Image (cartoon, grey):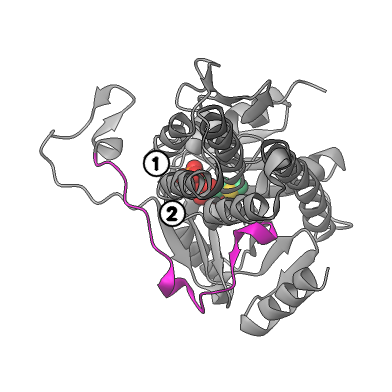
Amino acid sequence: MTDRLKSLEWKNNVLYLLDQRKLPQKQEYLACTDYKEAAQAIRTLAVRGAPAIGITAAYAMVLAVLAFTARGLSGESLRHAFYAAGEVLEQARPTAVNLSWAVREMEKTFDSAEDDKRCETLTRRAMAMEEEDKQLCHSMAVHGADLFSGKKNLTILTHCNTGTLATAGTGTALGVIRELFRRGQLSAVYADETRPVLQGARLTASELRKEGIPSILICDDMAALVMKTKKIDAIIVGADRIAANGDTANKIGTYGLAILAAYHHIPLYVAAPFSTFDFSIPSGNHIVIEERNPDEIRYVGNTQIAPADMPVFNPAFDITPHTLISGIITERGVISHPDKDSVANYERSISHG
Ligand SMILES: CSC[C@H]1O[C@H](OP(=O)(O)O)[C@H](O)[C@@H]1O
């Protein structure tokens, strides 16, 4: 199997992050030894993708506790410093709930760990989080591909990047696509470029080409024509935060794809693990949408494409109402036509193990 692009690696108490800003031209790694470096990597999208930034934050909190302990901090001063580091990481990006979920998990592990084993316990928890994500990706891939049992020559459209660069495993939406390819059911993938940061053109295209998965790159504004003329069997996307009624925050442009899909009677599926659900909020209206640096739109790479003083609106995500979602592919199966009742059943299945 061709080596896949890995988003991150923990080795000898150093967190190596593949700098996704440099892809596809260069494969360079950031060697993070300080939690603030990891926070900056999340903030600048050197590492991105909801699950990947959650796992990055978990390892960054290990870096924090190693540094604080080495400085002789202990007891309440250590706990205060550790929680403060978590706050810095959590504030790096507001929309993906995986980030705050991971910080809460590490705080719980910190508080329950024995003093003399705290660093080891936290390291094991972060490594377990990474391993869990690999398993979650596999389970989602199986449940997602099973949706298409018996179907051949499938053509799937996907948005942004949801593969090995966004997770610790084979991906969420892209993990399902990989499994369909492995099962011999896939005819082609249409990947859109995903302006302004171009995760589709730069990252998804790289992942698909590297593995010989038949794929076609399109501009975002071609989606309507492609749905009208190219026999799209389904649209599969990822998620950054899913509310208790199934409303889903995902990369900007997803909401438009969902409206187009409904018009063309094409099912749209969201693939996401339990750590992407925010059961504490009743609907998508409560999800904070990150607004990013205007220069992400005024420039493509280093090339200026708009006046330097041009006012810009740059939301990184939008909200797709659950009524436009045919199913949410999770590690426990598919929540078909999600609503507050079916999502509540899923939550119960998670909390009851
Ligand atoms: C597997 S979740 C990936 C999810 O994250 C992306 O956002 P970003 O690239 O800004 O981190 C996008 O919303 C994807 O669906």
Q: Is residue 167 left or right of residue 92?
A: right
Q: Secondary structure at mark 1?
A: loop
| Circle 2 crowding by C-alpha within 10 Å: few under 14, some 14–19, many from 20 | many
* Residue 145 on image: x %, y %: 81, 53
Mark 2: which secondary structure? Answer: loop
- Residue 120 location (% of width, % of height): 72, 36
Question: Label 2, label 1: how many angstroms apart (C-alpha)?
Answer: 9 Å
Is 121 in front, or is 311?
121
Residue 220, placed above or below residue 304: below
Question: In the picture provided, is 214 more to the left or to the right than 224?
Answer: right
Q: Earlier in the sequence, mark 2 or mark 1?
A: 1
Q: Is residue 285 visible?
A: yes
Image coords of residue 348 (percent x, y): 75, 77
Residue 64's disc is: none
Residue wearing tag 1 = 195
Q: Amino acid at mark 1?
A: Arg
- At label 2, the amino acid type is Gly
Image quadrant occupied by the C terminus:
bottom right
280 falls in the magenta region: yes
Position of residue 4 measured from the top left corner of the image (x, y, whole percent): 71, 26
Closest to the observer, 329 or 306: 329
Q: Residue at x 84, y 38 (%)?
A: 182
> Which mark is on residue 253?
2
Residue density around tag 1, few if under 14, some if 14–19, many if 20 or more, within 10 Å: many
Q: Which residues, given as a range, are shown in magenta?
A: 271-294
Q: Are marks 2 and 1 in contact (CB under 8 Å)?
A: yes
